[in-house]
Image (spheres, rainbow, N blue to C red):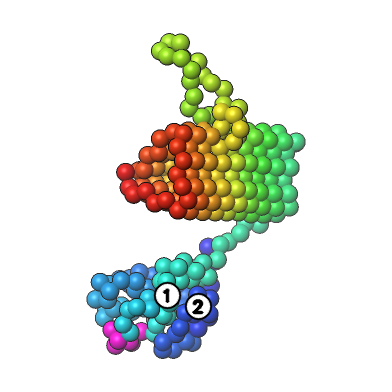
Amino acid sequence: MTKARKTLSELAALVGGKVVGDGEIEILRVASIEEAGPGDITFLAHPRYRRYLAACKASAVIMGGQLPVAPAMAAGRALLRVSEPYIALAKILHALNPPQRPEGRVSPHASIDPAAVLEDEVTVFPYVYVGRGAKVRRGTVLFAGVFLGDGVEVGEDCVLHPHVTVREGCRLGSRVILHAGAVIGADGFGYAGEGKGRIKIPQIGIVEIEDDVEIGANTTVDRATLGRTIIRKGTKIDNLVQIAHNVVVGENAVIAAQAGVAGSTRIGNEVILAGQVGVVNHIEIGDKAMIGPQ
């Protein structure tokens, strides 16, 4: 990953903060308050961590606006005062660690169906499979072992990490990130009858994932029995989550690890499901609901 360097004043302009001390200090890295050294910026979001400042060797400290200045300044640190330390930290991490984009090459060790369409600047690593009629838009990266079934559509600037599976007919918007082992479009869990008379119900729908969605490692989103399972734009889903067939997850929702959502449930916009939340089928969760762990 390519490293960058910024002055503290440049970082302040980026996050809308105020410098207390030397704004020309050059910042190379972000580090924890216990491990930071010269050239590092660290952060202090809660008063209970102030005790680490005396021994901290960081060049600068990100501090929430409500925390007193004196302890940090007494320790000889420049400050970056902000209203939201974690948001500032996220922006600074992006600025100092810009992603290294692959070079838009298609490995000769990938298997690309002649009827598939790959636009310019698509990067395909070895042992990727792209099926008949699949379409991959500009700037997308397919890491080793990715499987795209027949008729899959992948938008611009997506990143599919190793061993991601997107089954036939499913659609991804732009800037979607799928982490290693995610499975999009496996069959929904549907059977008719009982005992030895159970008959599998064919799952002939698809999964549609809108723009700017990120899905964690080994998470599964099942295809619809009929129609679509939908993950709307901006939603973030953690590792080891199960989304069943015909679920609709609204915009900018957050779903934490080991949550499970049963079939045909509707989840509103900006909903938060914490770790190990279980949601039964055929219910509706309204916008901005927050559901605690387990």
Task: Locate residue 260, reporting x and y percent.
Answer: 41, 39
* Quadrant of the drawing holding the C terminus: top left
Q: Quadrant of residue 153?
A: top right
Which labelled disc corresponds to residue 83? 1
- Residue at the image point whose x is 32% and y is 79% from the top: 67
Q: In terms of depth relative to the viewer, which is nearer, 228 or 171? A: 228
Distance (Cα) linking label 2 and label 1: 9 Å
- Are there few (<14), some (14-19), or many (20+) residues within 10 Å of tag 1? some
Q: What's drawn in magenta, residue-wise? A: 70-77
Asked if residue 257 can be seen in this view, the reply is yes
In this rendering, the answer to whether 251 lies above or below 198 is below
The residue to which callout 2 is attached is 16
Q: Are marks 2 and 1 in contact (CB under 8 Å)?
A: yes
Q: Secondary structure at mark 1?
A: loop
- Residue at the image point whose x is 46% and y is 41% from the top: 284
Task: Locate residue 149, reporting x and y percent.
Answer: 63, 34
